[in-house]
Amino acid sequence: MAEGGEEDLPRDAKIVKMLLKSMGVEDYEPRVVHQFLELWYRYVVDVLTDAQVYSEHAGKASIDSDDIKLAIQSKVNFSFSQPPPREVLLELARNRNKIPLPKSIAGTGVPLPPEQDTLINPNYQLAITKRRQTSQPEETEEDEESADPNPTPRQNPSVSHEKTDVPQGTPQRVSFPLGAKRPR
């Protein structure tokens, strides 16, 4: 990094540069110093805020070194955790591996749910309207307005009547899967 303009830097930035140099870091971007300063300031503010809370909880008028030590200790315990010792992990692994794996129910391959139970199963819903069997002329809006709202059915012996559950003219919904096998 270029050494130009070092006398214009604040004291904290100079300290960060000296820390980087003492650790053997010679080449870095200038914004690295600013990022370390931001991290440093945020950490100090967090520790002092926690120390103030501890001081108020203890009923003290001002923050003392014990409050700061407690805040730093709680920050270290909260932020930085050590992994458990190797012996503890090995013991946990031995206990877990004592339990055998369940036997595979399915054959080879990945067990999948039945196709009808999957969400990616393609299906369609079609609206099929039943056509009228008689060849009566279509009614216009004027005919519908003048017609009796509750007409009585007329019996014509020459026309055979079939009973249907679906009223005429209402769409009937049909749903079927695309990949279903058709009976031959």
Image (spheres, helix red, strand yellow):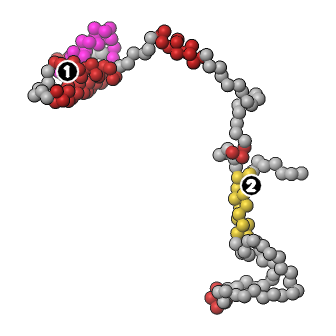
Q: Residue at x 31, y 9 (%)?
A: 23
Tag 1 secondary structure = helix
Whether 62 is drawn above or below 115: the answer is above
- Of the image marks 2 and 1, the number of the one nearer the N terminus: 1
Q: How many marks?
A: 2
Residue 176 drawn at (x, y percent): 74, 55
Name the amino acid type tagged 1: Ile
**Does 35 sit left or right of 137 as displayed?**
left
Residue 68: image tag: 1
Residue 3 drawn at (x, y percent): 24, 14
**Occupied quadrant, residue 22:** top left
Residue 34 visible in image: no
Whether 149 is drawn above or below 122: the answer is below
Task: Answer few, some or many: residues within 10 Å of disc 1's Cα (few below 14, many 20 plus, some between 14 and 19).
Answer: some
Q: Residue at x 70, y 72 (%)?
A: 170
Residue 176: image tag: 2
Nearer-the-camera pick, 77 or 46: 77
